[in-house]
Image: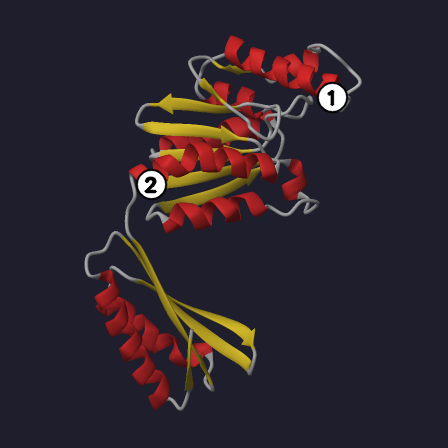
Amino acid sequence: MIVELLVIGNEILIGKTQDTNSNYMAKRITKYGHKIRRITAVGDELEEISNAMREAINRKPDLIIVCGGLGPTFDDMTLQGIAQALNTELELNQHAYDSIKRRYEAAYERGILKLDGMTKEREKMAYLPKGSTPLPNERGTAPGVKIKEGDTLIFCLPGVPMEMKSMFKIVIIPILKEKKGKFMEKSFFFTGIGESQIAPYVTEVEEKYPKLWIKTHPRLGEYGAEIEVSITAFNVENAEELADKVIDELKEIVIHLDGKIKES
């Protein structure tokens, strides 16, 4: 599947909060052989959310996962933005309303909250885009949302990492497993020569094996500056065999250039 991630929140854009959610999702989506085409972050602005969603839908990915902006405050406007992008309206979803109400009643009875009942702000979380399906939030109050738009599935998850991870495991992982593809990754390290020195040789090898993505990553390692060569592929037959050939070829080049190999 082709997947896009849309992360919502001013706190991400100003650097107050680090976006660990997209990193968490990307690792797991890739693990099951699906390709993330784009990760987009926008602020808590209606037009920004609406435009980003509309653009994502127009690219026709199989799956769009939106994270953040589902809460009770005035700046939580993810669902309103999505509704606007889909040319539809928000409507009170009774199932979502009942679920939210039960959550607040339980919290009040346990003494966690001092305010009882459904306020305007709490009720706000039960307004979902018309035709969508609420998703249970096992770790919080705001429900997630599932929407089908043409051949694209849209899932809206909470931005709180604990809530997002719980919903991702319950809702998204089964879909990833059901439509599982093949992802391959292999790598090795070398020292003694710079990234620019091996760059022309990597380009030649990439042209020879166009189905593989070959990338060099400079970094500071245990023995000083070192370069990682990583090889990845999605849904390529004989990917492991091809990757092994590439690694052998690049290792010979590194040794020829007086570099030293470090196995990953």
- Look at the numbered disc 1 and give the secondary structure of its residue: loop
Give the left or right position of residue 190, taking residue 235 as reference. right
Compared to residue 37, the image places residue 63 above or below, namely above
* Display coloring: secondary structure
Location of residue 203 (image quadrant): bottom left
Q: Which residue is mark 1?
A: 110
Q: Residue furthest front?
A: 110
Location of residue 123 (image quadrant): top right
Quick one: label 1 or label 2, which is nearer the N terminus?
A: 1
Q: Residue 33 at x, y = what percent?
A: 32, 48
User: Residue sitting at 55 percent across and 43 percent down?
Assistant: 21
Nearer the camera: disc 1 or disc 2? 1
Compared to residue 134, the image places residue 197 above or below, namely below
Q: Which is more toward the observer, 170 or 241?
A: 170
Q: Residue furthest right?
A: 114
Give the residue type that dot 1 points to: Arg
- Look at the numbered disc 2 and give the secondary structure of its residue: helix
Q: CA distance from mark 1 to mark 2?
A: 38 Å
User: Residue sitting at 56 percent across and 79 percent down?
Assistant: 222
Q: Which is more toward the observer, 177 or 71?
A: 177
Give the residue type that dot 2 points to: Lys
Give the left or right position of residue 169, taking residue 43 as reference. left
Location of residue 212 (image quadrant): bottom left
User: Residue sitting at 68 percent across and 21 percent down?
Assistant: 74
Q: Which residue is mark 2?
A: 177
Mark 2 neighbour density, 10 Å: few (under 14) some (14–19) many (20 or more): some
Give the left or right position of residue 125, taking residue 73 as reference. left
Q: Residue 92 at x, y = what percent?
A: 54, 9
Mark 1 neighbour density, 10 Å: few (under 14) some (14–19) many (20 or more): few
User: Residue sitting at 30 percent across and 74 percent down?
Assistant: 247
Q: Residue 23 at x, y = what percent?
A: 52, 49
Image quadrant for the N terminus? top left
